[in-house]
Image (spheres, rainbow, N blue to C red):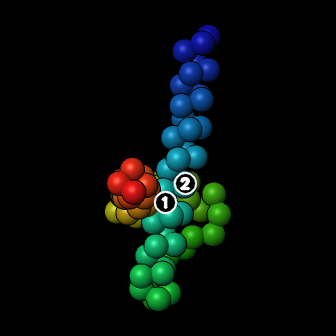
Amino acid sequence: MSIVIDIFVWLLIDTAVGFLFYSTGCFILKALTFGRFEIEFRDFSSFKTNKAKKVNLTLLLGFLFYVSLIVLIAYL
């Protein structure tokens, strides 16, 4: 029973962290392209439908933002 609970908890964590990285990547792309980047980003349900598509580059951009932020804080 605890294995099922662990899998469920890790799936929730994966979805939450993925949404955080995805939303950060979307906002960075919007800022860098001055709003010309068109993406159907509305809420969490649209993230789950877009997750089936290829959103890996947006997730990677959000992840790299947080990694670079941590590196910058560690450097300072």
Going 42% across and 82% down the picture, which residue do you hit? Answer: 32
**Helix, strand, or loop for circle 1?**
helix
Q: Is residue 27 above or below residue 67?
A: below
Residue located 54% across and 15% down the image:
3
72 vs 45, left or right, is: left
Residue 34 drawn at (x, y percent): 47, 89
Name the amino acid, label 2. Phe
- In the picture, the disc for residue 19 is 2
* Depth check, front residue: 6 or 46: 6
- For the question of whether residue 35 can be seen, the reply is yes
> How many numbered marks have been drawn onto this rendered protein structure?
2
Q: Is residue 46 above or below residue 30?
A: above
**Which residue is rendered at x = 60% and y = 12% of the image?**
2
Q: Position of residue 38 (x, y in %)?
A: 48, 81
Q: Quadrant of the N terminus?
A: top right
Location of residue 10 (image quadrant) = top right
Under circle 2, the secondary element is: helix
Q: x, y (%) of residue 22?
A: 49, 60
Q: In the rendered structure, which amino acid carries the disc numbered 1?
A: Tyr
Q: Give above or below for 12 relative to 18.
A: above
Asked if labels 2 and 1 touch by Cβ distance under 8 angstroms, the answer is yes
On the image, the x and y values in percent for residue 51 come to 47, 55
Drawn side of residue 5 relative to residue 69, left or right: right
Examine the image and state in which quarter residue 9 appears. top right
From the viewer's side, name the closer residue of 61 and 3. Answer: 61
Q: Quadrant of the C terminus?
A: bottom left
In the rendering, which numbered label is found on residue 22?
1
Residue at the spot 63% in from the left edge and 69% down from the top edge: 42
* In-front residue for pair 14/49: 14
